[in-house]
Image (cartoon, helix red, strand yellow):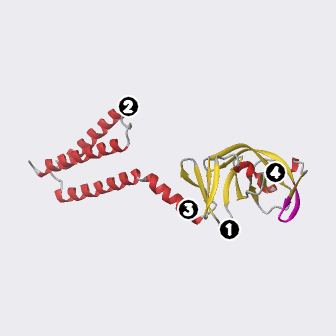
Amino acid sequence: MSPRVLILLVGCVGIAALIWFLADMFPGSLESDIDQANLVRAFALMVLIGAGLVLSPRLNLKGALKATFIWVMIGLVLVTGYTLKDDFAAIGSRLAGALVPSRAIDSGAGEITLRRGSDGHFNVSAEVNGARVQFLVDTGASVVVLTRDDAERAGLRPDELKFSQRFETANGTAFGAPVRIARLAIGNLVVTDVRAAVMNDGLGGSLLGMSFLERLTSFSVEGDTLTLRR
């Protein structure tokens, strides 16, 4: 058997092995007749192109083997990267959580974890009616409390609210307006129709209070980690 034919056969076996590996890694990907037909056409096209290159009288066998090795290694890297994409995403998410404590980390099974900030508090970036709001997690607050600026960005129209509710804050007595938040989301944790209040003044930042936390299955603190569960 000539070296050219041997290279062609090795290439065909390698492609077939790669297809088998991918089909085993991603079951159900070749269930439909269309997917199978596309695979057969792609395999036949690769074999045809490969045969034309390998059997060409101008082919440099040493160069061909080198190029084949390079492409095989590239294919292995791509396959490995795709196979481990979830692990890489998890590592990246944990790293981002360490660098940005307010970033919620989806730890799986309906859980979100937060890292304690350098100020000793748990801060979290959430969506209020689609608007991004930075919260301080405060279990001592009976309801979610928004500053005027955050409420305005969330479409709650502070100028049209009646600030008749009395609150005792660290800065003294303040007045707020009761509202309902249509949707409050932290990562994959979504709670609708949340009781809240908009503060007229006297509040340095928005507070994530019990009217949101009590709607979760549970929440707990272990060391510097706060875990929220659906």
> What's the CA distance linking mark 3 and mark 4?
31 Å
| Crowding at mark 3 (Cα within 10 Å: few <14, some 14-19, many 20+) | some
Name the residue beneath numbered marker 1. 120
Question: In front: 128, or 51?
Answer: 128
| Crowding at mark 1 (Cα within 10 Å: few <14, some 14-19, many 20+) | few
Disc 4, SS: strand
Q: Which residues are magenta?
A: 168-175
Question: In front: 134, or 192?
Answer: 192
Residue 190, image x and y in percent?
65, 45
Comes first in the chain, label 1 or label 2: 2
Name the residue beneath numbered marker 2. 32
Comes first in the chain, label 1 or label 3: 3
Q: Residue, x 26% and y 38% (percent of image)?
A: 44
Name the residue beneath numbered marker 3. 96
Disc 1, SS: loop
Comes first in the chain, label 1 or label 4: 1
> What's the CA distance linking mark 1 and mark 3?
18 Å
Q: Which tag is nearer the camera, tag 1 or tag 4?
A: 1
Comes first in the chain, label 2 or label 4: 2
Name the residue beneath numbered marker 4. 197
Q: Residue, x 25% and y 43% (percent of image)?
A: 16
Disc 3, SS: helix
Which residue is farthest top? 33
Q: Which tag is nearer the camera, tag 1 or tag 2?
A: 1
Q: Which tag is nearer the camera, tag 2 or tag 4?
A: 4
Occupied quadrant, residue 105:
bottom right
Establish if 38 lies above or below 68: above
Residue 202, image x and y in percent?
85, 62
> What's the CA distance linking mark 1 and mark 2?
55 Å
| Crowding at mark 2 (Cα within 10 Å: few <14, some 14-19, many 20+) | few
Comes first in the chain, label 3 or label 4: 3
